Image (cartoon, grey):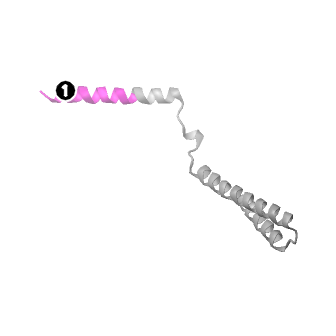
Amino acid sequence: MPWLFLLLAIAALAIAFMASSMVVVVICLLAALGLIGIWVLGLLAQRVGNQSRDDSMMLDPQELRRLRELAEAKRAQSATGEDARAP
């Protein structure tokens, strides 16, 4: 989709070069500038969207609590195991 804005900007520049009226030239140049800005922002949004994480991979609070409890139980078990081996 962002490439469509680039094509429209190129078309606006072509019209600006061929126009004989100064009003049309200014309007087309402003339109081309705006369309190029939208094109760049579209490319950036696409890049950010491609690098963002999938929402389905996020943990819900219950799962996070369960994982913390498991980690604490493993830590407690390893600490108890180390205390038994120490004497």
- Please state the horizontal and vertical placement of residue 41, each as a whole percent of the image: 66, 54
- Relative to 86, say whether 33 is above or below: below
Q: Which residues are magenta?
A: 70-87
Q: Nearer the viewer, residue 32 or 52?
A: 32
Quadrant (top left/top right/bottom left/bottom right) for the N terminus? bottom right
Q: Is residue 71 magenta?
A: yes
Query: Which amino acid type is shown beneath numbered disc 1?
Result: Asp
- Please state the horizontal and vertical placement of residue 48, each as a whole percent of the image: 59, 51
- In the picture, residue 39 is in which quadrant? bottom right
- Which residue appears farthest toward the left when viewing the image? 87
Q: Residue at x 83, y 69 (%)?
A: 15
Q: Residue at x 25, y 28 (%)?
A: 79
Count residues near mark 1 (Cα–Cα under 10 Å), then give few for <14, some for 14-19, many for 20+: few
Q: Is residue 70 left or right of residue 13?
A: left
- Please state the horizontal and vertical placement of residue 13, each as a whole percent of the image: 78, 68
Quadrant (top left/top right/bottom left/bottom right) for the C terminus? top left
- Please state the horizontal and vertical placement of residue 32, each as a whole percent of the image: 76, 62
Q: Is residue 86 left or right of residue 13?
A: left
Helix, strand or loop for disc 1:
helix
Q: Is residue 46 left or right of residue 7?
A: left
- In the picture, residue 26 is in which quadrant? bottom right
Q: Residue at x 77, y 64 (%)?
A: 29
Q: Nearer the viewer, residue 87 or 57?
A: 57
- In the picture, residue 17 is in which quadrant? bottom right
Q: Which residue is mark 1?
A: 83
Q: Nearer the viewer, residue 33 or 56?
A: 33
- How many numbered tags mark residues here? 1
Q: Residue at x 33, y 30 (%)?
A: 74
- Which residue appears farthest toward the bottom when viewing the image? 18
